Image (cartoon, grey):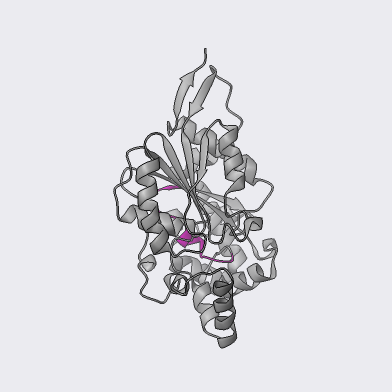
Amino acid sequence: MIADVYPELGFEQCTREVLADVAARHGVDFATALFYDRVRRAPHNRELVEAIEGPSPANGRATRVRGRVLIAPALFYRERPDIGGDGAVIQAAARAAGLEVEVLPVDSAGTAHANGRRLRELLAQRCTDHTVLVSLSKGAADVRLALESMPPPSGLRAWVIVSGLLHGTPVIDHLMRRWWRRWGLRLLMARYHAPVELVHEFSAEGPSPLNVRACAPAGLLVINLFGCPQSAHLGTRFGRRRHRELAPLGPNDGLTLLRDAIVEPGLAYPLWGADHYFRTPDVPHVLNRLMAFLVDRRCFSLERTL
């Protein structure tokens, strides 16, 4: 069983270099299963894993939850609503819990730097009391740059990162090495009126500040949700190709390395079989249980109705 192999490797020892070595020896699918196991068994993640996968909590005294969920959307969330970059499934889970929800009005095709500056203003205005911030994919880089340039607002209780594209990704560098791929990338940027600077921000080989390891803001609860797909789980041609290109570097979701999708110190929950777009039938259940976990952590205010 996967839990019995590499007994010397705990979550902390599963660095990018170690995971790349495991992938080289045994294949990326084995390395993905190993990392999935180590994340789930890490002692600091046990409470979150049990909250999401354990039995439903017993109903206590009736309460009403009050608070706000802010969503930092993914790249092209307006132009490509079909991939869920506006967090529709998260909006549904938050509203079912009785929470206010807002998709933050950042530029759908904006750079992380420009959106980070915009988020500084928005977070200062919106995070007045009992607020949870949820970032999706590239929205995590926007939030990261915002929080690195400001103290967390007093009302911000938690940052939930879903499939975080927090660092530069080798996918960009693969695309930039062939002239026809470079042109394809430029055409994509032009189609959605995105600046070329956006591409350079996410190069793993360039001087972008995103290539410095992200750290959780002091005192802020951070929860990382990310997919752990094996080769057979990738449903699109683009996803399969990118997953294969990243495979020598270790477990990945078809767009970023899984180790790069985690901000520490923070909690982490891996979703088996999900790709970067976090699309599996289990997602609504995971998000509903996550909302209950955030309520238990007092990230929202509770009012008794009896």
Residue 256 is covered by the magenta coloring: yes
- Name of the residue lying farthest toward the front: 193
The N terminus lies in quadrant: bottom right
Q: From this view, report whether residue 110 is shown above or below residue 175.
A: above
Using the rendered image of the protein, determine whether residue 10 is visible from the camera's viewpoint. Answer: no
Left or right side of 167 for 75: right
- State the extent of the magenta-drawn residues as a range: 254-267
Residue 178, percent from left and from top: 56, 86
Q: Residue furthest top?
A: 306
Residue 218 left/right relative to 189: left
Residue in view at x 51 percent, y 81 percent: 176
Picture residue at 42% right of the left edge, 70% below the top: 201
Q: Picture coordinates of residue 179 (x, y %)? A: 56, 87
User: Which one is nearer the viewer's eye here, 67 or 169?
Assistant: 67
Is most of the magenta stretch helix, strand or loop?
loop
Corner quadrant of residue 97: top right
- Image coordinates of residue 188 in percent, x first then y, are 58, 73
Q: Residue furthest bottom?
A: 179
| Residue 40 magenta | no
Check the image and report above or below for 229 versus 150.
below
Residue 124 spot, x, y in % from top left: 34, 45
Q: Nearer the viewer, residue 230 or 27?
A: 230
User: Closest to the observer: 50 or 77?
Assistant: 77
Visible residue check, residue 228 = yes
Foreground pick, 157 / 118: 118
Count of picture labels: 0
Q: Residue at x 57, y 44 (%)?
A: 90
Residue that appears at 39% across and 48% down: 122
